[in-house]
Image: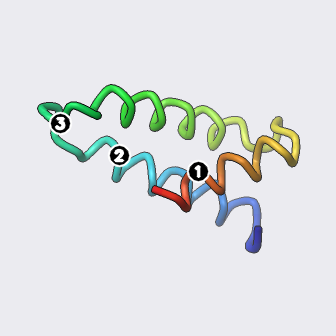
Amino acid sequence: MTGSRQELSARLIQTVGQLRSREDDNPDAVVFDATADLLEHVAGTWDQQDDQTRQRAYVLAQSL
């Protein structure tokens, strides 16, 4: 994981925006919404999260 905490948190928020912009008629929409909720929560509480949670959230965001 490289970059400042702000940059990493911003990457999560960017991914949230991409997930939320998908069409609701997609069968996977519920998964996209749940993933967006999770990433949004982690980004909003970034300083309170442990390193393992941050790394997992970052990897998840990068994989989408």
Q: Earlier in the sequence, mark 2 or mark 3?
A: 2
Q: CA distance from mark 3 to mark 1?
A: 20 Å
- The amino acid type found where label 1 is placed reads Leu
Please tell me whether residue 5 is drawn above or below residue 28 in the rendered image.
Answer: below
- The amino acid type found where label 3 is placed reads Asn
Residue count near mark 1 (Cα–Cα under 10 Å), binned few <14, some 14–19, many ≥20 = some
Image coordinates of residue 22 in percent, x first then y, are: 23, 45
Q: Quadrant of the N terminus?
A: bottom right
Image coordinates of residue 42 in percent, x first then y, are: 66, 37
Image mark for residue 1? none
Q: Earlier in the sequence, mark 3 or mark 1?
A: 3
Q: Earlier in the sequence, mark 1 or mark 2?
A: 2
Contact (Cβ within 8 Å) of mark 2 with mark 3:
no
Task: Name the residue beneath numbered marker 2.
Answer: 19
Which mark is nearer the camera, 2 or 3?
3
Q: CA distance from mark 1 to mark 2?
A: 12 Å
Say left or right for 37 vs 8.
Answer: left
- Towards the viewer: 39 or 44: 39
Residue count near mark 3 (Cα–Cα under 10 Å), binned few <14, some 14–19, many ≥20 = few
